[in-house]
Image (spheres, rainbow, N blue to C red):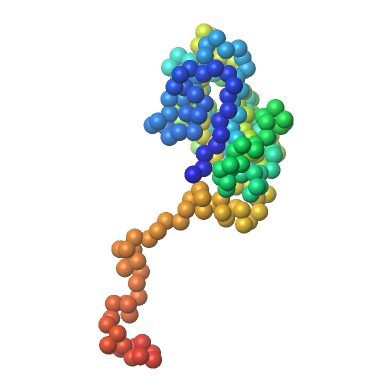
Amino acid sequence: QFCPIFECSQMQLDGYHAENLAKDFSQNNGFVVDPLQRLPIDIYIRLPFNIDIKHIYLSPVIGHHRSTLIELSVNHQIIDEKTSWLIKSSNKSNIVNINQISFHRIAQILNEDETTRRIEIHDQDNEQQPTDHTIRYRFSSNLHLVNCSTIKITIKRKWRLSSCALKYLQIWGVLSNSIPIELKNKLQQIISPPSKESPSTNNRNASPLDEIPSDFLDSLTCDL
């Protein structure tokens, strides 16, 4: 099952760790750091394969805790069949140290509006009107949205006496074209395995001849 690796070296409140951001919304308590932690706060999201990013949605507020300045950056290290832990789980122990890779900024979000509950970042203009309490941005560089392997979220400012927080994070993208077609097919089967047809479906798709006893069919033409 696809699941990125979340890393955050700063102390987080009990039950509000960065890994929560990968959970379903109903099971997600969100991410909150200890109020004594000094800024900036870095969250690293390692992907098991390269993607092209299309949209990123996040909520910067949990209760009275709010993040007001957030920077998003990416790394373009190529992940192949020998290094992807989605293909082989033991590859997790061979991932490159985060301090040895460089990042390119793709967005910087400054929002001190107390009513904002959702931030959307798109690779192109969205003509639909945003819903209430939602603010939309464009990525600052579409060039760096391709072949992303690690995403870095840096919280540089928080609201007054609150702590840095993220309620949820959604990253929308597609498998990069740099992935060999054989590996891409294998990844797609792992992420979205083909569904098995139910017996009722098979019966509906069966040929009418399958329902006719063989005694009534010509042995050569299979006609009545």
Q: Residue lying farthest top?
A: 161
Task: Identify the image quadrant of residue 143.
Answer: top right
Image spot of residue 162 (x, y percent): 50, 11
- Left or right of 40 on screen, residue 129: left
- Left or right of 199 on screen, residue 142: right
Question: Residue at 58% across / 28% down in the picture?
Answer: 7
Question: Residue at 65% across / 47% down in the picture?
Answer: 82
Question: Residue at 72% across / 30% down in the picture?
Answer: 100
Quadrant where the C terminus lies?
Answer: bottom left
Front position in the image: 196 or 97: 97
Image spot of residue 109 (x, y percent): 60, 24
Question: Residue at 30% across / 63% down in the picture?
Answer: 200
Is 158 placed above or below 119 here? above
Image spot of residue 37 (x, y percent): 57, 12
Residue 206 visible in the snapshot = yes
Is 185 placed above or below 133 here? below
Front position in the image: 165 or 182: 182
**Tag count in the figure?**
0
Residue 145 visible in the snapshot = no
Image spot of residue 53 (x, y percent): 60, 40
Is 217 placed above or below 101 here? below
- Left or right of 220 on screen, residue 149: right
Is 113 placed above or below 178 here? above
Task: Identify the image quadrant of residue 91.
Answer: top right
